[in-house]
Image (cartoon, coloured by chain):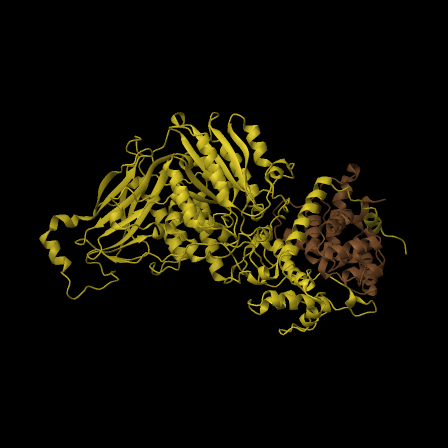
Chain colours: A yellow, B brown
Amino acid sequence: MNMQPFEYDLRHLRAPPPDPMARERAHQAALQEFERVHAMPATAAANEPRMRPARPVNSRSAWWGGLASACVAVVGVAIYWLLPPADRVAQLQPAVAPPPVVETQQAAAAASVQAENTAPPPAGQNVARPRARKPARAAVPVPKMDMPAVNEPAPPVSQPEQRRADTSSSALAIVTDKPVPPSAPPPAPTPLLPRASAATGELSEVTVVGSRRAAPDMVSASPMAIVSVEAENRDRFQHFETNPVKLANEEPVSTFSVDVDTASYSFVRRQLNQGVLPPVDAVRVEEMVNYFDYSWPIPTSRERPFDPMVAVSDSPWGKGRKLVHIGIKGYEVPATRRPDVNLVLLLDVSGSMNSPDKLPLAQRSMALLLDSLKPTDTVAIVVYAGAAGEVLAPTPVREKDTILAALNSLRPGGSTAGAAGIQLAYQLAERNFRKGGINRILLATDGDFNVGISDREALKSYVGREREKGVFLSVLGFGEGNYRDDVAQTLAQSGNGVAVYIDTLNEARKVLVQQASAALFTIAKDVKLQVEFNPDSVAEYRLVGYESRALNREDFGDDKVDAGDVGAGHTVTAIYEITPVGSPARMIEDRRYAEQPALRAQQRRTASSEYGFLKIRYKLPDSQRSRVLELPIRANTGVPPRLKQDVEFSAAVAGFAQLLRGGRYTGTLTFDDVLRQAQASRGEDPFGYRAEFVQLVRLAEQARGM
Amino acid sequence: MDDPQITVLIRRAQDGNGRAFGELVDRHYDTIYRFAWKWCRHRANAEDIAQQACMKLACNLGQFRFQAAFTSWLYRLVINCAQDWQRAQQRHAHTDLAGTEPTADPHRAEDAIYIDQLLQQLDQLGEGMKETALLVHAEGMSHAEAGAILGVSESTISWRVHIMRKQMQQREPLASTTA
């Protein structure tokens, strides 16, 4: 038969010669993997952490998931080969017998069952799946072939964690040195293939590896097919309970610290864009509300950096209840009067950052940041992975090319020693300290700090001590699956900084360019709010959000107690839901033996015109003594017409966030209601953030339906 | 079956000798990379697939039992990596897909698009079609060899080759760019 045109073309398909650099990278990566496989002692395999409760899939790791599951099998095989021959035979008679398959898989399964002897039973079966999709029917002796048992879409697999918090021996450090995000079953969507590790544990190499293809564009986080696939996820969030309803006459004083972080919103957005509802603990109502900019009154002087606003409106989800909005906006430092900036970028280049939405996105985000700095400001770069190293000495922003070149030369590889990197970054920041200027470390990480000073408290107090010396720390979180939100929050809070989560380049633009001054210039620190409710007019109250920022009543006046900081132009919004006296919407019944509030109100009629009294305590950035601002919350306050849309929109966001947290206090509120409120109060929305919110509400509704 | 040198390298690597493993990788990188390139026809993606394959080799070499030619086994491994890669790509159609990167020969830029379409069409003809076409036509393997790699019988490969011819004949217009 004549050769057909397509056959001819295929026959003459010629691949270009391989790139020596790529070959070398592959060689190194394979060797590293080889060493990892062979270095892993049997005990390490057996001690691998067990499965976590299944959670919505991390869609970006599917490609790696297959590899990772393959490695589980091989670890087993490696152990198999380490055994003396007699034991090998014994191993081939597994107690937990998988379906009869060819010899290799039995061995793998047996060894793997042994290696994971504390794992739930399904783990072994996963490894020992039939190798060929279609059983061979004809003459060719296929069953005798040795095939890697890796071709099938891996079923959800019990995946050993790559990093362990208590790792200290160097052998284990190598083991952890694997660029494999957590496992996910293949049906999950995966973006571009992540660059594989350049296998560099050594920092010198990190800096010299030539530039590779530009990182894939991460701007789009477009809604994808709704998936509901189960896989483990190692993102960690501090658990917290939703603030309860309190009785004004039993506990009239409510105290909390401001929170200008917005990480929760970005994380929630990312989850929803993937078609899954976020885990409840990932939803912090105040961070969702504070993600948006509101037109709260702008203060005019640096000395009095806030001009607090109070508004009272009807609760959109609780009939007979009211919402009390407290809004503050930080003083905006004029660009011409910005202090000098001494910035140290501290980048995690460990293997776990090897994903388009991690290191490459961090690099591009940092590049964006350069645009919002003055030419005389300086930037230094420190990286950490297996070890920490200085990549770029403090360099004026004027020499942008030098900074960009250093930034773009970074490649992921190695394990994570966050603490050593932080120490080095602080040394650099202190060496280049600008008196009266901004001295800040920007830490970009996926939140992994497991090698080195892994004691979170030690790290936290270290950051706290450095804060006293005038060097602040902010945390930029990247990626998911491994995101340690709890660590990021802790560090940023003790470093007088913000924790933001960057999931797209757009988000980076918002945080690092539009809000650069907020991220960099603290205008007030240790900002605490205290509201005393008037039991004569308020029966019950509930603070919406700020659970992780609660303070004791006595902390308010104690200047030694650390609290949140506010950057230039930051807006902070707090919402209380109150039930006025006499409203039928009360949730808690009167005590039989309590004094009757109505009677007291008659006695002190004057006071009942106030719902409560607001106090804000803050310190100017260079001061150790706090000042206080006071404002009564009058029952007839209402909402200033200029702020009506902002009040309504923030209430819609708060409602949405509460629904995502389970909607314990939101009555019959639905996503549809939120949608309507948000659409009605969208306002000008120059950057489209509010429009995006409306989309998220739709996505949440879809995801919930799954 | 295999070059005795290769057999020695494999055995040493299986015993945990890193240098032998490195040597093994170096000797096969070209084969791996070139096949990966033919699969996706994009340099950087091919490099990624090849690197994945090398890393997977590190993981899986212990499973090789010399019951088949090492190259056949290796091809299978590369195909697995390529399939994983392709699945990942398809789930993210909006990212910058390989598309029409210039080939080694810039004069054949049009043909590059044609080849991409061709491979896509073959892929759509059914499971294993693209793999079969690449192994038989682009790599010049016999039906028996291809069958051994893909884990199907020789006759299945012959049948697939036949089906592809028949189907592609009906789509003649696409093949117009060739001589």
Residue A266 in the image: state x and y as whole percent: 46, 47
Find residue B42 and report its image quarter: top right
Q: Is residue B78 visible?
A: yes
Residue A541 in the image: state x and y as whole percent: 26, 55
Q: Is residue B97 above or below residue A664?
A: above
Of all residues, the one furthest to the right in this rendering is A1
Residue drawn at (63%, 35%) of the image = A208
Residue drawn at (46%, 30%) of the image = A431
Q: Is residue B43 visible?
A: no
Residue A221 in the image: state x and y as whole percent: 53, 47
Left or right, A225 with respect to A641, comes to: right
Left or right, A585 with respect to B19, comes to: left
Find residue A672 and report its image quarter: bottom left
Residue drawn at (65%, 39%) of the image = A213
Residue drawn at (36%, 37%) of the image = A468
Q: Is residue A457 above or below residue A157?
A: above
